[in-house]
Each structure stands twice: as structure tokens, then as C-alpha cells.
Image (tube, helix red, strand yellow):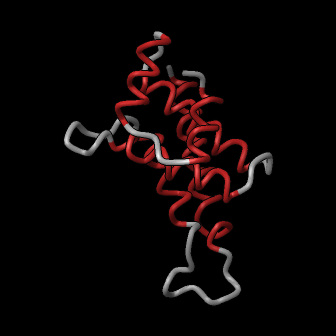
Amino acid sequence: MKTEELERLATERPITVAEATEACSASGEVLAEVIEELSLSLARRYLSDQASFAHCDTVISNLSPVILLGSERGMLSDVAWSIYLAFDEGEHRHTKDVIEIDPQERYTRPMLKKLLEEVKGKKDRA
């Protein structure tokens, strides 16, 4: 399954582990790589203002069952989960924040920037 197709589906509804696994198997792709690639793409496009918070948050939230793999088998991708958590932090005002604080600017953007720097650092060392 191409990341574009998975993203399109995830804008409409939650994606099940079974359907994601089956689609990747049918196309010969590795599920963890597809999910991580799509998650990183969402983070990069959001940070460069090429995709809205609402779009990215919806997609990553609808991918969370796949990222979690039902939890009993462990996390599919730590990177994808970190991206999910960054968008989750931007969904609401935090208790100690004043009303003027934009949670997306205060939490989501810095978390994503830090994560992308870490991912780049790991690739540079590899």
C-alpha cells in the first residue's frame, strides 16, 4: 500500500491492523517502514505548513491502532508513536497554560522539530 493511499484512507476512518498488514503484504512492503515513512511525512509537511494540524492529527490518530499494534505485540514504530504523541499534545490546552498559549505552537511544533533532528542525527551516524 502506498503511503498516499494509506493517508487518504486515514483521513476518512481508523485503519485496522489487519487491513494495513494485508495491504502491505500484498504489495510486498514492510508495514513498519510504511507507517514510519507516512508519520515522518506528516511531521515534515506540518512543520513546513504544507499540511494543516487538523489533517495531520486526524491521519496520525486514525493510524494509532496500527502504530500500537493492539499493544500486546509492542510498538510498531517508536518514531510514529512519538509523532502521534506530539500531535496529541496540540489537541488541547494544558491545565497550567494561559488562554493565549497555542498548544500546537507550545507543544506539537517543538516536539516534532526535536524528533526530526534526532531522526536525522541517527541517519547521519548510520
Quarter where residue 68 is shown: top left
Between 5 and 89, which is closer to the camera in this rendering?
A: 5
Residue 94 makes an appearance in the image:
yes
Q: Tell me what residue is drawn at x 25 percent, y 39 percent.
A: 74
Q: Tell me what residue is drawn at x 41 percent, y 15 percent.
A: 25
* Horizontal side, residue 14 vs residue 70: left or right: right
- Vertical placement of residue 41 versus 62, above or below: above
Quarter where residue 116 is shown: top right
* Horizontal side, residue 83 vs residue 51: left or right: left
Residue 83 makes an appearance in the image:
no
Locate residue 61, reporting x and y percent.
50, 53
Q: Tell me what residue is drawn at x 56 percent, y 33 percent.
A: 121
- Vertical placement of residue 1 versus 94, above or below: above
For the N terminus, the quadrant is top right
Between 60 and 44, which is closer to the camera in this rendering?
A: 60
- Vertical placement of residue 100 versus 115, above or below: below
Q: Tell me what residue is drawn at x 25 percent, y 45 percent.
A: 71
Locate residue 125, reporting x and y percent.
52, 24
Locate residue 66, reporting x and y percent.
39, 39
Quarter where residue 105 is shown: bottom right
Number of residue marks: 0
Report the residue that reaches farthest toward the top. Answer: 28
Locate residue 40, reporting x and y percent.
59, 37
Between 13 and 120, which is closer to the camera in this rendering?
A: 13
